[in-house]
Image (cartoon, rainbow, N blue to C red):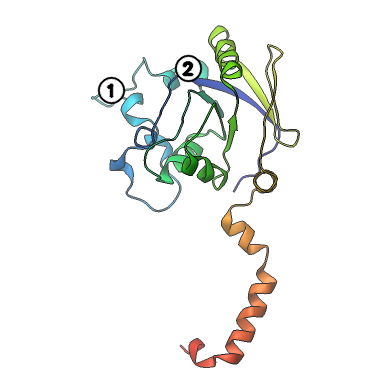
Amino acid sequence: MEKYTTHTSVAALMNRSNVDTDQIIAKQFLKKVERTGFGQHLFHDWRFLPDGSPNPDFELNNPKFEGARILVCGDNFGCGSSREHAPWAIEDYGFNTIVSTSFADIFYNNCFKNGILPIVVDADTLQSLMAEITDDEGVAFTVNLEDQLLTTPGGMQVAFELDGFRKHNLLNGLDDIGLTLQHTDRIDQFEAQHKQQFPWLWVG
């Protein structure tokens, strides 16, 4: 998993509330178990017209949002089913930060397992961030994870709360597998002892 460090990126605006996981990645695309390749289907029903061409009215098709890694959106983002494919699609598309007033619990937890930082702000702060993007589409925000601070060219400084364990994992690029691999010495020791105690289980 990619380490999350301080970065500056275009902030894309999706002023929609209750964006559910079926809109993030529709069920017909849940045909793979690997994490890659889902970005092309992110928000498929909104991004594309029935003939497959880009929908010019959809927010993320705005050329000024091209290359954005920060997504600013409405309340209750990631609601609906618990599919982990949703953060897979968001990460594969290129986003590593989502700003909202609230997230669905399962989606929120899955973000950290996939290198995505979900930032929770109050309603007034969200409206100010959205207004700055609306007034200057293509504006870049800076996120400093170490200091837990989001800053904007307009002078906003938004401090955000974050669990220390999750912060550590993002800073060091650790998912569940990475955390496990930090204990390979103990795992090897356990396996060696287990082979001695139960050798018949290790035959073949």
Q: Quadrant of residue 148?
A: top right
Amino acid type of the residue tagged 1 in the rendering? Leu
Q: Position of residue 69 (x, y in %)?
A: 56, 29
Give the residue drawn at x 54%, y 92%.
Answer: 199
Q: Does any portion of residue 99 appear in the rendered image? A: yes
Q: Is residue 51 above or below residue 174?
A: above
In front of the other: 198 or 11: 198
Q: Visible in this render: residue 67?
A: no
Instruction: Name the residue beneath numbered marker 2.
Output: 63
- Residue 36 to residue 44: above or below: below
State the SS at label 2. helix
Q: Which mark is residue 49?
A: 1
Could you tell me residue 108's position as x and y percent? Answer: 52, 40
Residue drawn at (68%, 43%) of the image: 167
Image point (52%, 34%), residue name: 94
Of labels 1 and 2, earlier in sequence is 1
Q: Is residue 75 left or right of residue 162?
A: left
Expressed as whole percent of the image width and height from the top left, the position of residue 183 reads 67, 67
Q: Position of residue 53 (x, y in %)?
A: 30, 23
Q: Are marks 1 and 2 in contact (CB under 8 Å)?
A: no
Q: Residue at x 24, y 25 (%)?
A: 50
How far, Cα to Cα, is label 1 from label 2?
17 Å
